[in-house]
Image (tube, helix red, strand yellow):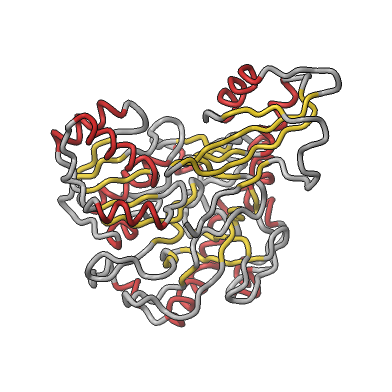
Amino acid sequence: MTAYFDDLETRDPQQREAELFAALPEFLAKAMGKAEGLRSWLGDIDPMKINNREALATLPVLRKPELMELQAANPPFGGLADPDALTGNHVFMSPGPVWEPQGFGADPWQSARGLFAAGIRSGDIIHNTFSYHMTPGAFVLDEGARALGCLVFPAGVGNTEAQIEAASSLKPSAYTGTPDYLKVLLDKAEEAGCDISSIKRAMVSGGALFPSLREEYRERGIKVMQSYATADVGIIAYESADKDGNPHPGMILNENMIVEIVRPGTGDPVTDGEVGEIVVTSLNPAYPLIRFGTGDMTAVMDGRSPCGRTGIRIKGWMGRADQRTKVKGMFVDPKQIAALVQRHGDVARARLVVARNGDQDAMTLHVEPSAGATPDAQALAATLADITKLKGDVVVAEQGSLPNDGKVIADERNYDA
C-alpha cells in the first residue's frame, strides 16, 4: 500500500514539528478562554510562550486520577470541554467513571487515517464489533469509517450467532473490533457453516494483537492491522503495511497531536529509545487535553517507516505505567479490586492475574482469606463480574501465599508470542 491519506503524512519532520508548535500557543490560549477547568488546572501561564517541547514539558501532566477528581468536583467534564461541543452531541462514559464528549466534525477521533493505512477504502462495508453501549469505542471507528466513505454495520458486542448470520448475508469486506473477537466470529461461522470469507481486512484495537494470532488471520485470508487509541483522545498511532499487506515495524503517530514519552510518575521527557509513558497533547478544540498521561508505555523508534510516512514511530504498547490493565478491550483498575475486597469481609488480600487462554485474555482472581474465614469462590466470581463487567476464575490461596510486591493486578501475558 503506497497511497497516503493526505499530504500531512509525508511532510518533512522538521516542518511538522514547526507547524504543530506554531499552532499550539493560539490553540492553548483559545482553549483556556473556553474551558475554565483547563485554565484553573494549568495555572498562571502565558500560553503564547508554550511554543516548543521544552516549554510544553513545564506544564503538569494530567493523568486519569486527576482527571477523575476534576470531573467529580465539576461534573461532567471538569470544565475541560468547550461548552459549544456539548450541544446536540454525544457524551460517553468509560470505567472510572470518566466522561468524554464527542468532538466536532465528521472524524472527531481521527480514525480515518489509520483505517486508510490498513487498506480500507471508500465503498468498503465494515462489520464494527466495538461496543456502542456507553463507551466511545465503536463511535471512534464508526465516525472515521463513514468519513472515509465506508458503509458501517453497527454490530456491537456479543450475540455471536446473530453476528455471523448478518456477516454471511451482508458480505462485509472489513472488520473492526478487538483482536481476539474476530477469531471468535471466524470459528463460530465455520462451526455453523456460515460463509464470512468476504472479510479480507481488519483494523483492531483495544487489546494486543499477538504475532501468532495475526499469522493465523493471514492464513485465513485476512490482513489485520492495529491502531493504538484511547477514549479520551482517539487514534494516537497506527500501523502501515507494504504492498502485500505485511506490517512495517512500529506504529506511526497520528497527525494534529503532540506526543511525548515521559518517565513514569513524572512529566520529564525521556530520550528517544527509552521506555516511558505516552503523554498526548491533542489539538482537539472540543476537548483540549493538554499533556494527558495515558498510563501506557512505549518507546520511540529510530528512522522513518518504509511506507514513506514521515511521522515519528513508536514501538507500540509496552505495558502500563500503573497497574490499570486492559482485558478484552476493557480497563480493569486496582480500585475495582479494592472495592471487591471491601464487599467480602472474608478476604484479606486479592491479586488479579491476567494471562492468555489460547487466543483470548483470561482473568484469575487469587484471594487470601481473612483469619478463620472460608471465602466463597462462586460469590467472589459474581462480584468480580459485577464490578469489572468481565468474567474471571477465582482461586482461594493460603494465608501469606500471595507475593509481597505491592501488585494488585499482575499482567502475565507474553506480548512477544
Residue 257 image point, x, y percent: 48, 63
Where is 233 relative to 74, above or below? below
| Nearer to us in this view, 318 or 111 | 318
Q: Is residue 305 left or right of residue 202?
A: right
Residue 184 image point, x, y percent: 33, 37
| Nearer to us in this view, 80 or 62 | 62
**Quadrant in the rendering for residue 197:** top left
Residue 293 visible (yes or no):
yes
Q: Is residue 184 left or right of residue 409?
A: left
Residue 250 image point, x, y percent: 44, 68
Where is 191 relative to 224, above or below? above
Going by the picture, which residue comes out furthest to the right?
Answer: 371
Q: Is residue 239 left or right of residue 269?
A: left
**Quadrant in the rendering for residue 393:** top right
| Nearer to us in this view, 153 or 192 | 192
Residue 32 visible (yes or no):
no
Quarter holding the N terminus? Answer: bottom left
Residue positioned 36% across, 70% down in the render: 248
Residue positioned 34% across, 47% down in the render: 141
Residue positioned 76% across, 29% down in the render: 368
Q: Is residue 380 left or right of residue 164?
A: right
